[in-house]
Amino acid sequence: MKEQDIYMPISGLRSHPEGIEALFSWMTDNWEELARRLPAGLSMLGSMVSICTSSFASTEGLERVQKFFSDKSTKGFDSSLAQSCDAIRAKSAWIARDRQDIKDWVGSYTVKNIKNEL
């Protein structure tokens, strides 16, 4: 597999809570190697940072991302990191604002038997 294809196998992990955690852990555990292999100037590192961080949806997730990058140079992917942090803030705010409405809607939903509909 070519280095530019690294996105393909990991992108699918962003849609599940365990996958989101696994991506962030993998990125943090392998940061030095990722930074070496994916030049920030070619946007590859920024894309990787976005894939591995933007799926968090809580202030705790945001704090973890910010803490990890607090002592690292973000030159070359600073805008990708900022966009990821903005996405996390937006999701966190949406959850805080609409959690009860969604819970109420899900609780009121009843599954219809398709055979009875026919």
Image (cartoon, grey):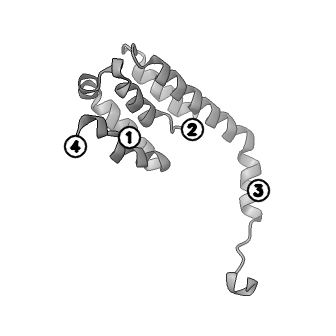
Task: State how far apart marks 3 and 4 are (Cα).
Answer: 46 Å
Q: Nearer the viewer, mark 4 or mark 1?
A: 4
Disc 2 residue type (three-letter): Ala
Instruction: From the viewer's side, name the closer residue of 66 and 1.
Output: 1
From the image, tell me which residue sits under label 3.
104
Mark number, residue 57: 2
Q: Amino acid at mark 1?
A: Leu
**Which residue is identified by label 4?**
1
Depth check: give the residue in front, 53 or 108. Answer: 53
The secondary element bearing badge 3 is classed as helix
Residue 66 place in picture, x, y as percent = 47, 22
Residue found 29% across the figure and 32% down from its top? 29
Q: How crowded is the residue under tag 1: few (<14 C-alpha within 10 Å), some, or many (20+)? A: many
Give the amino acid type for the residue marked by disc 4 in the picture: Met
Q: Which mark is residue 23?
A: 1
Q: Secondary structure at mark 2?
A: loop
